Amino acid sequence: MAVRHFLTLMDLSRQELINLTNRAIELKQMQKSGKVYEPLKNKVLGMIFEKSSTRTRVSFETGMIQFGGGAIFLSPRDSQLGRGEPIADSARVLSQMVDIIMIRTFEHEKIETFAKYSDIPIINALTDRAHPCQLLADMQCFQERRGQIQGKTFTWVGDGNNMCYSYINAARQWDFKLNIACPEGYDPDPQLMQEASDHVEIIRDPIAAAKGSDCIVTDVWASMGQEEEQRQREKDFANYQVNDTVMSQANKDALFMHCLPAHRGEEVSASVIDGPQSVVWDEAGNRLHAQKALLEFLLVKS
């Protein structure tokens, strides 16, 4: 059987993603009820971090422990990857030692190369092109709170970055409408927009983009590696804060999401992220359950 990888949401079929979301909800209920379920006994997850993260490391490591397996953390200082070993060589070697690998890095091409030479499943835990694991958690969170996702309207406010890219793919896979409010010069990749043209639309004004939305989503203005652009981005995104005015244009029961960490007073006001429409804490917690469902899908053969 061919090895399955999870580099973007497009690596799975629509039905597989829907099944994953439903399974994540089941696993969450099982874990909260105290049921012990260890399908990955003696399995090992290799975790390669070239970009640091709180939620990604803790959720994957906890998930493997709860599933009866283990996880090994590798930073650039802990591996030959940080000393220039070819990616293909590292992929071939690690494939012989662990059962599945999660990578959080900068260039998307790097994880594609790793997957090409790997004999085991590779999970994208974030690249400059995509953050599919976060979208699994987001879709789970929306379904738990509001039910069916298909046909709903989501609004992305901010940079056309990796999170925005993954929301575009999510709109195609879960079949919802995505409004993208971003300043000129920060648009998502034109080819990706073309591929999803029947699901996505750029609306420059965030207030107009939020009108009639079921969920408003944003992210920091300057991501890791863009710190030198912070001041310019603060100017360019000054009118793109998700605040009470923006939320008032959305449906009354609209949710607010953010992948975290958040900068209150920049991309989102404190009144919104700490307000009653915010589900960011459940969203973050769902990283554990969504990724457990993904690990089970990739490693437990039916």
Image (spheres, helix red, strand yellow):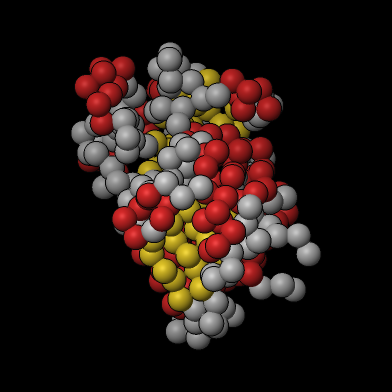
The relative height of residue 285 versus residue 229 in the rendered view (above or below) is below
Q: Most extreme residue toward the right, as rendered?
A: 1
Query: What residue appears at the point 35 percent right and 53 percent down from the top-left corner?
Result: 76
**Front residue of this view, candidates 260 and 111:** 111
Q: Residue 157 placed where, x, y %?
A: 41, 29
Q: Residue 128 placed where, x, y %?
A: 46, 37
**Front residue of this view, candidates 103 and 205:** 103
Is residue 9 at least partly visible in the picture? yes
Q: Quadrant of the C terminus?
A: bottom right
Q: Residue 28 placed where, x, y %?
A: 50, 70
Choose top left, top right, bottom left or bottom right for residue 71: bottom left
Query: What residue appears at the point 45 percent right and 31 percent down from the top-left corner?
Result: 161
Choose top left, top right, bottom left or bottom right for residue 172: top right
Left/right of residue 214 with respect to residue 231 in the rendered view: right
**Front residue of this view, candidates 100 and 172:** 100
Query: What residue appears at the point 38 percent right and 64 percent down from the top-left corner?
Result: 73
The relative height of residue 204 versus residue 31 in the rendered view (above or below) is above
Q: Quadrant of the N terminus?
A: bottom right
Is residue 253 at least partly visible in the picture? no
Query: What residue appears at the point 25 percent right and 36 percent down from the top-left corner?
Result: 269
Q: Residue 266 placed where, x, y %?
A: 24, 31
- Image label count: 0
The relative height of residue 240 versus residue 285 in the rendered view (above or below) is above
